[in-house]
Image: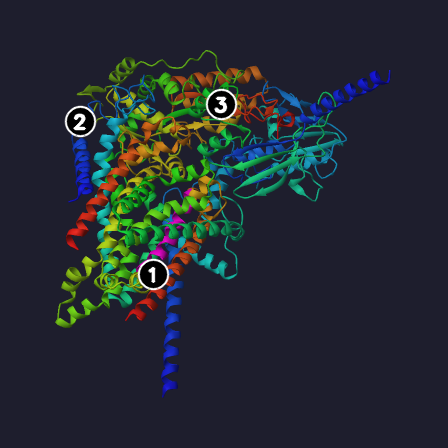
């Protein structure tokens, strides 16, 4: 592992540790409202200041990390797997399978999923725990987010079908399933890794956007997405640079993921 | 004999094209129907904000409710809608009270311009950076590009749109900034993998010109994937157009789509979905066909 | 001699030039501000949404106008008017020599035409429905080209003031509703982008010195739903005013340029929380029992810290609400009412009196159910979301667990009016009328808008029956004192029973650029441009 990758692992480990020990690092919790200290700048008591309801931003970043960092990669994994199966397998099988799968993908890309999400919220009872609501949200995101990669994977797999080494393997007598899992799928890795990496921040942000439909995390529980939403009050953010900390943290974490993924790719290339 | 074979081939090609067009049309129509079903099933379909006005008398509220009832049965609605489309009438929007055709006609050029410029800028940037990453193999350069795309991915689209208003950048740049990181990552990974394939490494070792390698070996190898990505990037841009247009105040189809979604405006939503499905299908089918040409040339 | 003459002439010409520029600087220019939504219609009779109302205010000519500053009724196109003793008839004496923006002459026939169109039973508009006090048709009698009397089938409360909303249409003009009598007329409309209004060359009003109004050449209204963008553009100088400003922007603006931000005091708008009391609602019976208990609602009301709501969410640009009407409504507000004091101990005692008990930090009812309910509100309103979170925290202190859910508006309305699948809602009333008769449909138990339990066949509680009776009394009286007595009692009952838990009355906040002269921000809508005909914009 080179220097960058060591740093990346250290960063991720540090963030995960901090999130795990959140109740010790931030004893006040994410919901405690200090009503006399509204929108305060960073101080001894509040390392990243307080938000507009007097809640400690540092605590909210820690607790938000727990949720977003656990669920977003899980959802990204789900969407990547679905893309691999739908896109990769379809492309490999070719013919009508590929055409049908691509038609389904195109439909998926064009339909207004907003309404499915609104219906999902309507089906959930109003009094659910915030955790349940956020898990359902990330699940839905994972189930809907596979379309980009599926198309590219289909094209990749189709190319691979007629590649020399696949032909040779077939000629030797390697069975279809084995061929797919052992020879074809690893070659789809560049696209799979790209899909996984992009999905993480995209899902984190989407979870916050779904808040307008009543999905996502419920007050007072924080998530990174909801913390990033604070940036939308751009008019004032220049004078309050500590509001950028969640963004900086997310960028660092995302880059660390990329570093580790690159390492994975190197190791299995 | 040669002539017969050629005629046969031509007929098969025609049949193939006809098959494709039919699949396209069927998918588009199915998309319209599914979107109508989705909108109908979602709660809030047959309520009207105006009902809340306490000045309205009981009869007026009843009249408002009755006006919505005609769209209750979704299949009947869709059949009558298709019938009207055959005569060139796309229906009338609930929330804006204007015929859908005029609305789309007035707004389509803005959106098309926005999308075309945004996509062009995003692809130029993505390819340029991906190529440099593959060529130069300098880790600093790669790290910087990764940082840029990570930062752009982590910024909410709303913030990007607001920034573009703040710094007076055109909406197309905002769309480019939203689409760029997504396609950069894929193209970079694909190109790097392509460049690490044995025959290209050997070609480079043998001293073949970089441009020649790029144009004749590296890119054609991944052309189908890049084309598929291009097709999908159109959908990404369409999705990005909605917040960008809404926030930058650009009167395009994206802004219309957002208003229609909030107002459960069924006629408008069905039409927009069909339009988007058509654009997506054309882009992706086009990518497929060209990709197949490349693939057949390879083998 | 010659030199002195020349000097005198030079001085005189300089003076004349200076005065001329002064006079020129006082007229012309374009006022620019934003509409929050696309105006749905330009037909003044069908207008319902805020954007269309604002356009109608600027383009429509009315017979009388409520002066937004003094709240008094003033003559406009009508020189004088008289309401009959039984409240069913109103006669107007109109100005003569006036024409519409396209030159068509104005007379009583146009007023009769407008009223007939407005009272068409097929037209379902709030403006028309406000006059519908009983079944039957409306008669108009044209006595002369400048005199008209209108008779309604039943007495209409506050009849004269209702004409502030009626923009007169021309019966004969080929331009139909585009021919207007107001200070501005519609010049250009780019759907989704902007509305351009130009000065009406045939506007009849002149100022005290005989100069023609309006002073402005044009008004440009950009359609911008996003408040952050609106604020950015105002700061950059692209907009001249923001008609209703959010409190957090107000403070930031006041910090840098205090003369630009205006706080006109408490407005008529209120925010309230209410519980679902509908018998057929799909919520557990135990919860229905809680919500229908007056003492439960009173306890919740006492447990909410309204001062904190006003201080934290509105940055003190709001006051705790005392009841259904705001003290800004000088005539109609029942001055004996005061906002409930924050006292969570008293709230707990009241709940314990009802059989609730606190166990390990959780409040439980008689049957042992933990008191848990959800508050829904519309997403996109940061103010309501924050209020909900503060209330969640307040109620946690007495052991009640609240779940906050923000929904998109149509889903919210569906739960509120059709499925009744909700437990508590926070919403607000905006653009409220001064006259309580405008809220008739909120207080009548049989009506659709009786939000906590609409469309009751017969009043389900004694106090709702009493409120029904009192509202009918005030609707049928013409004597303002009698009406006030009845409505004062309605306000008292509402405060005693708390079907709506009134939270706060917002202040009217606005921003006016220093370029604009003559603006006097007030609480009645349109707050900043109610005197648009007398505004000028300098330095363009």
Q: Would residue C79 be seen by someone viewing this image from the given angle? A: no
Label 2 Cα crowd, 10 Å radius (few <14 / some 14-19 / many 20+) = some
User: Which of the chains bears the disc numbered 1?
Assistant: B
* Residue B98 percent coordinates (x, y): 54, 47
Query: Do labels 1 and 2 touch, CB within 8 Å?
Result: no
> Which residue sits furthest right?
C1
* Snapshot quadrant of residue C162: top right
**Label 3 neighbourhood size at 10 Å, few (<14), some (14-19), many (20+)?**
many
- Say which residue label 2 marks: A23
Residue annotated with mark 3: C509
Quickly name the residue at label 1. Answer: B211
* Quadrant, the C terminus of chain B: bottom left
Q: Which residues are magenta?
A: B225-243
Residue B268, x across and y down, in percent: 46, 49
Which structural element holds mark 3? strand
Q: Chain of mark 3?
A: C
């Amino acid at each position: 592992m080179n220097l960058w990758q060591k740093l990346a692992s250290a960063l991720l480990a540090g963030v995960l540790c901090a999130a795990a020990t959140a109740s010790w690092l931030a004893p006040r919790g994410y919901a405690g409202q200090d009503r006399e200290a509204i929108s305060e700048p960073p101080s001894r008591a509040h390392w990243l200041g307080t938000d507009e309801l007097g809640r400690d931003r540092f605590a909210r970043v820690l607790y938000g990390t727990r949720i977003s960092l656990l669920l977003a990669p899980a959802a990204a994994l789900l969407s990547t797997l679905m893309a691999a199966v739908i896109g990769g397998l379809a492309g490999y099988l070719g013919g009508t399978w590929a055409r049908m799968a691509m038609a389904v993908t195109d439909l998926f890309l064009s339909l207004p999923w907003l309404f499915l999400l609104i219906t999902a919220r309507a089906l959930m009872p109003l009094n659910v725990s915030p955790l349940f609501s956020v898990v359902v949200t990330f699940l839905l995101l994972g189930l809907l987010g596979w379309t980009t990669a599926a198309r590219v994977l289909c094209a990749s797999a189709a190319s691979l079908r007629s590649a020399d080494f696949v032909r040779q393997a077939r000629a030797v007598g390697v069975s279809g399933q084995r061929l797919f899992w052992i020879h074809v799928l690893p070659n789809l890795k560049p696209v799979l890794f790209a899909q996984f990496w992009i999905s993480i921040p995209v899902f984190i942000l989407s979870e916050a956007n779904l808040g307008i439909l009543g999905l996502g995390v419920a007050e007072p529980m924080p998530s990174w997405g909801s913390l990033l939403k604070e940036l939308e009050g751009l008019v004032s953010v220049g004078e309050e640079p500590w509001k950028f900390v969640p963004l900086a943290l997310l960028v660092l974490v995302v880059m660390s993921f990329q570093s580790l993924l690159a390492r994975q790719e190197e190791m299995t290339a | 004999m040669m002539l017969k074979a050629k005629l046969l081939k031509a007929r098969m090609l025609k049949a193939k094209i006809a098959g494709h067009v039919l699949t396209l049309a069927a998918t588009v129509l199915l998309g319209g129907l599914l979107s109508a079903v989705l909108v109908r099933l979602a709660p809030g379909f047959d309520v009207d904000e105006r009902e809340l006005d306490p000045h309205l008398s009981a009869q007026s509220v009843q009249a408002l409710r009755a006006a919505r009832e005609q769209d209750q049965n979704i299949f009947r609605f869709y059949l009558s809608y298709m019938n009207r489309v055959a005569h060139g009438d796309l229906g009338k929007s609930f929330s804006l009270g204007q015929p859908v055709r005029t609305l789309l006609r007035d707004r389509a050029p803005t959106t098309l311009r926005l999308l075309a410029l945004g996509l062009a800028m995003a692809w130029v940037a993505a390819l340029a950076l991906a190529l440099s990453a593959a060529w130069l193999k300098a880790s600093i350069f790669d790290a910087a590009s990764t940082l840029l795309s990570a930062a752009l991915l982590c910024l909410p689209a709303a913030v990007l749109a607001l920034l573009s208003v703040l710094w007076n950048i055109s909406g197309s740049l905002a769309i480019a900034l939203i689409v760029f990181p997504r396609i950069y990552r894929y193209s970079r990974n694909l190109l790097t993998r392509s460049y690490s394939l044995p025959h290209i490494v050997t070609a480079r070792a043998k001293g073949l010109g970089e441009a020649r390698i790029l144009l004749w070996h590296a890119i054609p190898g991944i052309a189908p994937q890049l084309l598929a990505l291009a097709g999908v990037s159109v959908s990404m841009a369409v999705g990005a157009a909605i917040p960008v247009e809404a926030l930058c105040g650009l009167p395009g189809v994206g802004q219309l789509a957002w208003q229609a979604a909030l107002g459960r405006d069924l006629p408008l939503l069905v039409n927009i979905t069909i339009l988007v499905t058509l654009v997506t299908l054309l882009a992706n089918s086009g990518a497929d066909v060209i990709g197949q040409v490349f693939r057949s040339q390879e083998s | 001699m010659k030199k002195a003459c020349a000097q005198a002439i030079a001085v005189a010409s300089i003076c004349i030039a200076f005065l001329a520029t002064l006079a020129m600087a006082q007229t012309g220019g374009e006022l620019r501000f934003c509409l929050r939504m696309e105006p749905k219609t330009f037909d003044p009779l069908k207008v319902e949404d805020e954007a269309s109302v604002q356009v109608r205010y600027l383009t429509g000519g009315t017979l009388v106008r409520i002066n937004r500053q003094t709240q008094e009724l003033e003559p406009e196109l009508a020189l004088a008017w008289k309401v009959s003793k039984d409240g069913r008839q109103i006669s107007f004496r109109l100005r003569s020599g006036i024409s519409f923006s396209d030159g068509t002459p104005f007379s009583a026939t146009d007023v009769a035409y407008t009223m007939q169109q407005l009272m068409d039973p097929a037209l379902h508009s709030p403006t028309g429905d406000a006059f519908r006090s009983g079944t039957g048709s409306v008669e108009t009698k044209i006595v002369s080209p400048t005199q008209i009397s209108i008779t309604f089938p039943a007495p209409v409360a506050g009849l004269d003031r209702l004409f502030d909303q009626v923009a007169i249409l021309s019966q004969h003009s080929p331009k139909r509703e585009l021919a207007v009598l107001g200070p501005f007329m519609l010049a250009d409309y780019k759907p989704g982008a902007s509305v351009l209004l130009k000065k009406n060359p045939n506007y009849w009003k002149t100022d005290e010195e005989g100069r023609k109004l309006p002073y402005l050449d044009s008004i440009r209204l950009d359609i911008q739903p996003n408040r952050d963008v609106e604020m950015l553009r105002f700061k950059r100088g692209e907009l001249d005013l923001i008609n209703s400003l959010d409190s957090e922007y107000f403070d930031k603006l006041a910090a840098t340029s205090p003369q630009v931000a205006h706080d006109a005091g408490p407005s008529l708008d209120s925010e309230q929380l209410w519980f679902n009391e509908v018998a057929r609602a799909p919520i557990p019976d135990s919860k229905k029992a809680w919500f229908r208990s007056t003492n439960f609602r009173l306890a919740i009301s006492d447990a909410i810290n309204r001062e904190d709501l006003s201080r934290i969410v509105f940055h003190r640009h709001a006051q705790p609400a005392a009841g259904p009407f705001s003290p800004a409504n000088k005539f109609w507000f029942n001055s004996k009412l005061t906002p409930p004091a924050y006292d969570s101990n008293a709230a707990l005692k009241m709940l314990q009196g009802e059989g609730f008990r606190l166990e390990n930090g959780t409040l439980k009812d008689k049957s042992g159910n933990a008191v848990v309910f959800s508050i829904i509100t519309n997403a996109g309103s940061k103010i309501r979301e924050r209020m909900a979170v503060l209330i969640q925290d307040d109620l946690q202190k007495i052991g009640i667990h609240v779940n906050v859910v923000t929904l998109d508006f149509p889903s919210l309305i569906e739960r509120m009016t059709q499925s009744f699948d909700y437990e508590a809602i926070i919403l607000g009333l905006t653009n409220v009328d001064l006259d309580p008769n405008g809220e008739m449909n909120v207080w009548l138990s049989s009506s659709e808008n009786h939000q906590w339990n609409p469309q009751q066949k017969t009043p389900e509680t004694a106090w709702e029956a009493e409120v029904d009776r009192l509202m009918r009394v005030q609707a049928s009286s013409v004597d303002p004192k009698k009406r006030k007595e009845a409505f004062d009692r309605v306000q008292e009952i509402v405060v005693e029973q708390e079907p709506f838990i009134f939270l706060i009355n917002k202040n009217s906040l606005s921003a006016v650029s220093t370029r604009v002269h003559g603006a006097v921000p007030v609480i009645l809508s349109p707050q900043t441009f109610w005197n648009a005909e007398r505004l000028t914009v300098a330095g363009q």
